């Protein structure tokens, strides 16, 4: 993976995910960056997806007025300025 420096995803006010030439995926949320091998990144994505599914079920069971997917609406992040 020579000369690779690609932003895979970005969410203003929250962070970004970047693939670099060192064969790592860098996940930056505010001031924190996690560096993962591509395989670990893939496993983490499955982990987060499973957690979101559980979160949605719990929120629906409690009859949440906000709803778990409201987090995807643009808003000021409590993690970054």
Image (tube, rainbow, N blue to C red):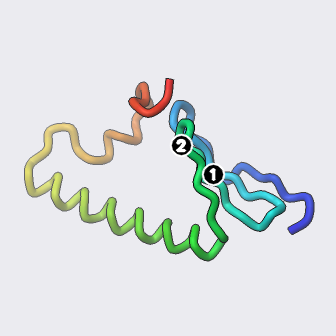
> Which structural element holds mark 2?
strand
> Which structural element holds mark 1?
strand
Residue drawn at x 56%, y 37% as measured from the top left:
31
Q: Please give the label number shown on residue 29.
A: 2
Q: Report the Cα–Cα distance between label 1 and label 2.
A: 9 Å
Image: 52 above or below 43: above
**Left or right of 38 in this view: 60:** left
Image: 35 above or below 75: below
**Left or right of 35 in this view: 53:** left
Measured from the top left, where is residue 13 in percent x and y?
53, 31
Q: Quadrant of residue 10?
A: top right
Q: Quadrant of residue 57?
A: bottom left
User: How many numbered callouts?
Assistant: 2
Image: 19 above or below 39: above
**Left or right of 22 in this view: 50:** left
Asked whether 58 or 1 is in front, the reply is: 1
Asked whether 25 or 70 is in front, the reply is: 25
Give the labeled residue for mark 1.
17
Measured from the top left, where is residue 78 in percent x and y?
39, 30
Q: Going from the N terminus, do you reach mark 1 or mark 2 first? A: 1
Residue drawn at x 65%, y 55% as measured from the top left:
26
Image: 77 above or below 22: above
Quarter of the image containing the N terminus?
bottom right
Residue drawn at x 9%, y 57% as measured from the top left:
61
**Mark 2 crowdedness (10 Å alpha carbons): few <14, some 14-19, many ≥20:** some
Among all residues in the image, which is located at the extreme left? 62
Residue drawn at x 24%, y 57% as measured from the top left:
56
Measured from the top left, where is residue 38 in percent x and y?
66, 71
Measured from the top left, where is residue 34 in percent x and y?
58, 55
Among all residues in the image, which is located at the extreme right? 3
């Amino acid at each position: 993976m020579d000369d690779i420096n690609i932003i895979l995803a970005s969410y203003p006010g929250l962070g970004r995910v970047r693939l670099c030439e060192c064969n790592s995926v860098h996940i930056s949320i505010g001031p924190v960056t996690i560096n993962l091998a591509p395989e670990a990144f893939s496993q983490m994505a499955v982990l987060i997806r499973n957690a979101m599914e559980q979160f949605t079920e719990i929120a629906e069971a409690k009859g949440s007025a906000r709803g778990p997917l409201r987090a995807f609406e643009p808003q000021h992040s409590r993690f970054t300025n």
